[in-house]
Image: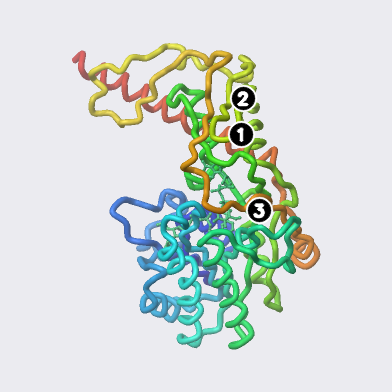
Amino acid sequence: MTKRALITGITGQDGSYLAEFLLEKGYEAHGLIRRSSTFNTDRIDHIYTDPHDAKSKLLLYYGDITDSGQLTNLIYNIQPDEIYHLAAQSHVRVSFDMPEFTGDVTGLGTTRLLDAIRRSGIKTRFYQASSSEMFGDSPPPQNEETPFKPRSPYGAAKVYAYWMVKNYREGYGMLAVNGILFNHESPRRGETFVTKKITRALARIKLGVQDKLYLGNLEAKRDWGYAPDFVEAMWLMLQQDEPEDYVIATGETHSVREFVNLAFNHAGIELEWRGSGAYEKGIVASVDSKQYGVSSVQNKNLEKPSAYSSLPTVYLSGKSQLKVGDVLIEIDPRYFRPLEVEFLQGDASKAKKKLNWEPKVKFRDLVKIMVDEDIKDLEEMRRCQDVIRKLANSKSMQ
Ligand code: NAP
Ligand code: G4F
């Protein structure tokens, strides 16, 4: 029989990869999406099919994790075999600005869902998106036995949700698990998380759309993995007979600075760091012109002709090559956090032993995947704009 999965947070990075993964496995995927004034389904548009088609296996429902009535309805009507609860206010820096909201969505959201399952009386398996942010300043390497010492409203909300999962598992015999996932990234990562912010800015600098990148703490260390590898681990956890919690990580750790250096190197730019603290700057030390590559379009120094007035606002103006000494990175203290998690490095040996799970993509390849994808996307956008420009010009000559 076809298995049915309900995914909250299906429009997010992980939700989109998980939906793809489950559809591939023959599941029917049901997703909760928020009503928004603009489309928020970019990450799943490629797998969406017309719901009028009887063969459609991806079905979406409006709802919100703060609306328990709708959650109970959905669970009762869909009767999912598996529920993957990924919806959250997932940004740590933002959680300091919106601590109450983060507690409501990221913490209480899990309780609402667990209780909706209990009230609806259905038998289902439940996955909770727990986070390495819960470890806070517990020293590395962190595993399932490491104490939680959260250092953000987000981390504290996730710790609360973690314990609710354990309580419902032990109190009501639910097959509910916590996947304690370390940072995982991809080209679909939200644009304000540091990895995507770096690779996106690098692509824009390379193509002459942006001059500088402003960052916060360069010394923080993270165990960065690849999101598609990590969603497989979520699924594996729910296929076990015994509900248990698992740490999922690569075991490798790198600083934000290392991420920046490697990303820029991959694009042919060698950086030199000068100054310290909030006054530190990342400066071009050398450019490998072969690796850096300068497309013919880039050298044209295109002027924005009047025929462009109705074109998209992100007009990719061309720019000549970078020069040694150009300042590309500066520090903006606004990106510092009131409290920081300095050092995360996961020990996923339990997942390896019991789930036979191992990461396929490690740090170096992850950085390359993200840089290449962002450069490719921007170049494609530029080509489209060139075509539009040509069309607009030929039209104005008629
Ligand atoms: P993400 O890209 O920020 O996606 C979050 C998802 O939650 C989006 O679909 C968002 O909808 C949805 N959402 C937010 N508030 C909601 C609400 N009130 N009601 C319904 N849906 C809501 O996050 P992600 O990186 O995919 O992470 C998935 C989950 O894993 C999150 O719970 C996150 O905290 C956790 N986690 C992530 C990592 C990581 O490194 N990525 C590591 C550990 C744990 P919109 O698209 O409409 O905004
Ligand atoms: O990319 P980040 O914002 O991710 P963070 O805070 O580690 O949280 C992510 O991973 C958690 C798992 O541990 C998830 F639970 C959570 O949902 C989210 O997905 O920041 C990473 C590091 C931090 O130390 C931050 O201070 O990068 C540092 N950083 C330096 N400059 C910056 C910036 N972070 C952001 N977002 N923006 C900056 O300009």
- Residue 215 in the image: x percent, y percent? 52, 37
- 375 relative to 124, above or below: above
Residue beneath label 3, please?
Answer: 229
Closest to the observer: 28 or 350? 350
Dot 3, crowdedness within 10 Å: few (<14), some or many (≥20)? Answer: some
Q: CA distance from mark 2 to mark 3?
A: 37 Å
Q: Residue at x 49, y 54 (%)?
A: 91
Quick check: marks 2 and 3 in contact, CB under 8 Å? Answer: no
User: Can residue 21 be seen in the rendering of this structure?
Assistant: yes
Q: CA distance from mark 2 to mark 1?
A: 15 Å
Q: Residue at x 49, y 69 (%)?
A: 107
- 357 relative to 304, above or below: below
> Mark 2 vs mark 1: which is more N-terminal?
1
Residue beneath label 1, please?
Answer: 260
Residue beneath label 2, please?
Answer: 274
Closest to the observer: 131 or 280? 280
- Residue 7 in the image: x percent, y percent? 50, 66
* Screen quadrant of the C terminus: top left
Closest to the observer: 230 or 98? 98
Quick check: marks 2 and 1 in contact, CB under 8 Å? Answer: no
- 233 relative to 45, above or below: below
Q: Secondary structure at mark 2?
A: strand
Q: Which mark is residue 355?
A: none
Amino acid at the residue labelled 2: Arg
Q: Residue at x 74, y 65 (%)?
A: 355
Task: State left or right for residue 62 relative to residue 344.
Answer: left
Quick check: marks 3 and 1 in contact, CB under 8 Å? Answer: no
Location of residue 303 by image quarter: top left
